[in-house]
């Protein structure tokens, strides 16, 4: 590719939380784009974004001529429009849940299974945010000793639900701090301010796990390529603006000491270990916010099992949990020659 070439990139959902960050990261990471076009709903069409970009509506005409599209506009929009972009010759990286379960569609964490991109057919799925950070932390342990069983409890921030959920937390918190009746919940079923919801996501008919919990179970096995991993998950929503935290207990197939696990985590890509009980040091949601890496701490032996390990995993759900990984996938596609750039006229 020469300097005057570069990809024509669409950002779908560009006015949302994740889309806004994707636009910024494409610029900051100097992704080789000759043009970036933001798309959102018809409500936002014509709006000017930072850098003078004008929001477009999705139409059969406006989606033509792109090389790469990063989607972050919800599963309904992805189901309708991602296949149309792909049919028009574009590679789509999709942040929604629309395609993650499709066996034909790679589900990729950039540091964990980039080889899955090699056989893509035009659409690539970005994992759920809470699964994403878990995979970065578990991959080195799974490669070294195999994971037989996994028990995860999440403490998920409200930004994982969307910008309206952040506003709900803020307005309820403000009201309660000023001695007023909080506004009735619109996004969640219960008040989220000063509360904890023990079942993040939705219960499908007849299921005693939420869809959020099912996503982590399914996606973990798909990304690690191991259907035999036993997994149980509880997803909770906490009144934190940004960054998901996870308590993880795992049992390895082969013995793995805490020291060996620590050495593996310290040298793994995309991970930062913060773990010193003598200083009460471990990662918090606020520490992780604004960083691309996944943070790990509280590494210790599970006293109830000789091959059990415990860890605490924290990451910014809007960055590595969504936008950073989507842009990293676009970078890997570029590096591996898996996008054919159109030559500028
Ligand atoms: N938040 C996270 O941590 C996270 C992590 C991983 C994946 N995701 C996924 O990313 C997606 C977006 O999340 P978000 O938090 O950024 O949500 P958000 O802040 O609510 O933004 C939604 C975006 O989608 C656009 N949109 C809505 N309906 C549309 C339509 N019919 N056609 C075109 N664009 C439409 C919105 O445009 P308008 O401004 O015009 O309404 C907005 O740009 C979801 O699929 C979510 O599951 C989110």
Image (cartoon, rainbow, N blue to C red):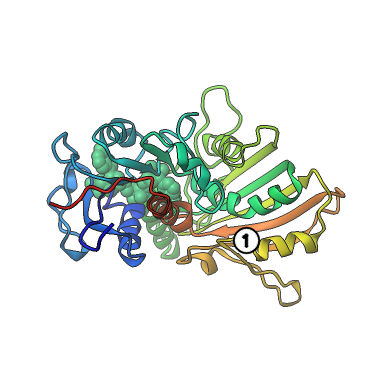
Q: Nearer the viewer, residue 306 or 188?
A: 306
As drawn, which residue projects farthest toward the front?
2
On screen, residue 249 above or below 107: below
Q: Around disc 1, counting alpha carbons within 10 Å, would you say few (fewer than 14), some (14 to 19), or many (20 or more)?
A: some
The yes-or-no answer for disc 1 within 8 Å of ligand 1 is: no
Identify the residue at image location x=65%, y=69%: 274
On screen, residue 70 above or below 52: above
Q: Position of residue 95 (x, y in %)?
A: 40, 44
Identify the residue at image location x=63%, y=55%: 137
Q: Nearer the viewer, residue 93 or 79?
A: 93
On screen, residue 277 above or below 230: below
Q: Nearer the viewer, residue 310 or 123?
A: 123
Q: Position of residue 300 (x, y in %)?
A: 78, 60
Q: According to the image, label 1 marks what residue?
A: 268
Q: Is residue 339 left or right of residue 157?
A: left
Identify the residue at image location x=17%, y=45%: 43
Q: Position of residue 156 (x, y in %)?
A: 53, 51
Q: Is residue 278 left or right of residue 49?
A: right
Q: Secondary structure at mark 1?
A: loop
């Amino acid at each position: 590719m020469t300097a005057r070439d570069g990809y024509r990139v669409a950002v779908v959902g560009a006015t949302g939380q994740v889309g806004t960050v994707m636009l910024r990261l494409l610029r900051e990471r100097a992704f080789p784009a000759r043009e970036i076009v933001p798309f959102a709903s018809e409500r936002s069409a014509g709006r000017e974004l930072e850098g003078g970009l004008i929001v477009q509506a999705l139409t059969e005409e406006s989606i033509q001529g792109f090389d790469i599209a990063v989607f972050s506009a919800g599963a309904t929009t992805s189901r309708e429009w991602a296949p149309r972009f792909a049919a028009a010759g574009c590679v789509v990286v999709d942040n929604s849940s629309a395609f993650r379960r499709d066996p034909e569609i790679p589900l990729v964490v950039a540091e964990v299974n980039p080889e899955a991109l090699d056989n893509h057919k035009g659409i690539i799925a970005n994992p759920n945010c809470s699964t994403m950070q878990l995979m970065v932390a578990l991959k080195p342990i799974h490669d070294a000793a195999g994971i037989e069983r996994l028990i995860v409890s999440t403490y998920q921030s409200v930004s994982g639900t969307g910008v309206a959920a952040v506003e709900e937390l803020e307005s309820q918190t403000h009201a309660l701090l000023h001695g007023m009746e909080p506004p009735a919940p619109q996004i969640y079923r219960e008040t989220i301010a000063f509360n904890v919801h023990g079942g993040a996501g939705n219960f499908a008919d007849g299921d005693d796990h939420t869809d959020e919990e099912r996503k982590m179970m399914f996606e973990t096995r798909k990304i690690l390529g191991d259907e035999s991993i036993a997994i149980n998950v509880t997803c909770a929503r906490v009144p934190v603006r940004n960054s998901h935290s996870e308590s993880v207990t795992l049992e390895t197939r082969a013995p793995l000491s805490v020291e060996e696990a620590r050495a593996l985590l310290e040298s793994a890509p995309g991970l930062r270990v913060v773990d010193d009980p003598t200083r009460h040091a471990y990662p918090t949601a606020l520490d992780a916010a604004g960083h691309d890496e996944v943070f790990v701490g509280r590494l210790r032996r599970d006293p109830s099992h000789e091959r059990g390990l415990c860890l605490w995993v924290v990451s910014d759900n809007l960055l590595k949990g969504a936008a950073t990984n989507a842009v990293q996938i676009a970078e890997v596609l570029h590096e591996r020659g898996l996008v054919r750039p159109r030559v500028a006229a």
